[in-house]
Amino acid sequence: PGDRVRLAIAFDRAEDSLRALGVPAAAAWDSSRRRIPDLPLYIQDGSHPTPAGSYLAALVFYSTLTGRSPIGLPRRLTGRAADDEGVPGGDSTAVLADIDSVHAAELQQIAAEVTRRGSQVRLAGPPPPLPGPPEMPPGSAPDPSRLTGRWVGRATVAPFPAVLELQVKPGTPAPQVGATLVFGPNRVGGEPSAATFENGRLEFTQPNGLQGLPMSFEGVMVGDSLTGVIRIEGAGTAARFHIIGTWAVAKRRP
């Protein structure tokens, strides 16, 4: 919710400064999640839209750009489907969205409401402060002899939630750590690398991580958990990344 407020204010400012036309898709999503809580707008990764989420956004774009009401538009859309890399296929009759009639009508009504209000869908009051970069939490130096085993927990990466799995094996002079990030059905990483201990922190790098870039981890012990900061920098397959996130894992008992 905090990020939603900051994003809304940022878009409002961009709209004003560029004299651009704003499309209130986020306001429509907010309304849908309140009024139709049983209709998921995100897929399992918590970031990308379901067909219903894409359909709702498309309704808002249509109504904003044409000035026409979205009520009564088709609930079933066909066209050229694209693969995960955005490359469209040759079949022009693929089903892109097929929303049941009840939910389609509700989404059309929501899109009509937010586009009638247009640029008046704004958040009042001063903007909230921007968050600073994540910092290492206070904790104790990890004991290398107690790290061996499997650790599982969560990571937040730009700002998508993921499952983080660490597999720690003994090594000389330091243990080997393999880190795997799990985003829904997708897994990245897992290659072991040597850990180091600097300034009371555990440090290790996953050489082949998100977008093929190395992921650098720093961590300390907080109670029974390993927790810390993750950094990803470099030119990936699609864009240049500079990401700082957080992570925390607990040891799985045999």
Image (cartoon, rainbow, N blue to C red):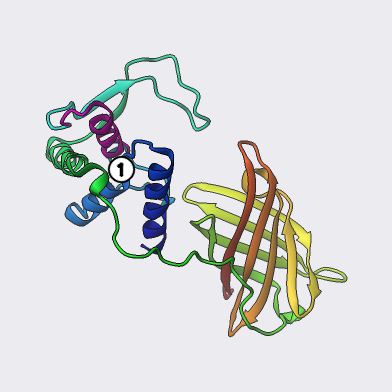
- Is 204 drawn above or below residue 137 in the view shown? above
Magenta span contains residue 113 = no
Are there few (<14), some (14-19), or many (20+) residues within 10 Å of tag 1? many
Tag 1 secondary structure: helix
Q: Report the number of numbered marks.
A: 1
Of all residues, the one furthest to the right in this rendering is 173
Residue at 63%, 67% in the rendered image: 229
| Image coords of residue 47 (percent x, y) | 42, 49
Give the image quarter of residue 76: top left
Q: Which residues are magenta?
A: 54-69
Provide residue 140's location: percent of width, then percent of height. Answer: 68, 85
Q: Position of residue 41 (x, y in %)?
A: 31, 47
Q: Give the x, y percent position of residue 25.
A: 30, 43
The amino acid type, in three-letter code, at marker 1 is: Ala
Read off the residue under disc 1. 25
Residue closest to the eye, 28 or 107: 28
Q: Is residue 253 left or right of residue 47?
A: right
Q: Is residue 60 magenta?
A: yes
Left or right: 106 in relation to 187: left
Q: Quadrant of residue 64?
A: top left
The kind of secondary structure the magenta stretch mainly shows is helix
**Image point (46%, 67%), residue name:** 129
At 57% from the left edge and 71% from the top edge, which residue is drawn? 249
Where does the N terminus fall, quadrant-wise? Answer: bottom left
